[in-house]
Image (cartoon, rainbow, N blue to C red):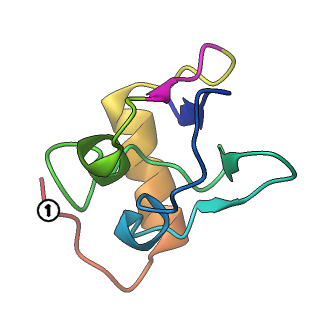
Amino acid sequence: MALMITDECINCGACVPECPNEAISEGEDIFIIDPDKCTECVGWYDEPQCVQVCPVDCIVDDPDHRETKEQLLEKFKKLHPDKEPKV
């Protein structure tokens, strides 16, 4: 499943450079994650990097975008056809 940022976000921006898919951007009030680009870092890392650096733990699973690890890996392959996923 994709991740989402809750309204507890303090707009520190720590998550933005950590996202290898460039799925995080500045929203109107808080940062947002594009579910079409978020792979939870599947294909890149063992854990979502944005979650690791968030100082307020406001990045959570998005219940509206449930995906299996296999689906996330397929999304990675579509987003990065020239990259070999790290599995």
Residue extent of the magenta highlight: 58-63
User: Can residue 25 be seen?
Assistant: yes
According to the image, label 1 marks what residue? 86
User: Can residue 34 be seen?
Assistant: no
Which residue appears farthest toward the bottom when viewing the image?
82
Residue 26 vertical position relative to residue 30 in the rendered view, above or below? below
| Rendered location of residue 82, percent (x, y) | 38, 86
Q: Nearer the viewer, residue 6 or 3?
A: 6
| Rendered location of residue 46, percent (x, y) | 14, 46
Q: Is residue 79 left or right of residue 73?
A: right
Q: Nearer the viewer, residue 68 or 18?
A: 18
Q: Is residue 4 left or right of residue 52?
A: right
Q: Nearer the viewer, residue 55 or 83?
A: 55
**Residue type of the residue flagged with mark 1:** Lys
Residue 10 vertical position relative to residue 25 in the rendered view, above or below? above
Q: Around disc 1, counting alpha carbons within 10 Å, would you say few (fewer than 14), some (14 to 19), or many (20 or more)?
A: few
Q: Is residue 79 left or right of residue 41?
A: right
Residue 38 vertical position relative to residue 84 in the rendered view, above or below? above
| Rendered location of residue 75, percent (x, y) | 50, 52
Q: Nearer the viewer, residue 2 or 67?
A: 2
| Rendered location of residue 41, percent (x, y) | 32, 52
Seen at 12% across and 53% down, the residue is 87
Which residue appears farthest toward the top when viewing the image?
63
Magenta span contains residue 87: no
Which residue appears farthest toward the right when viewing the image?
28
Q: Is residue 84 left or right of residue 72?
A: left
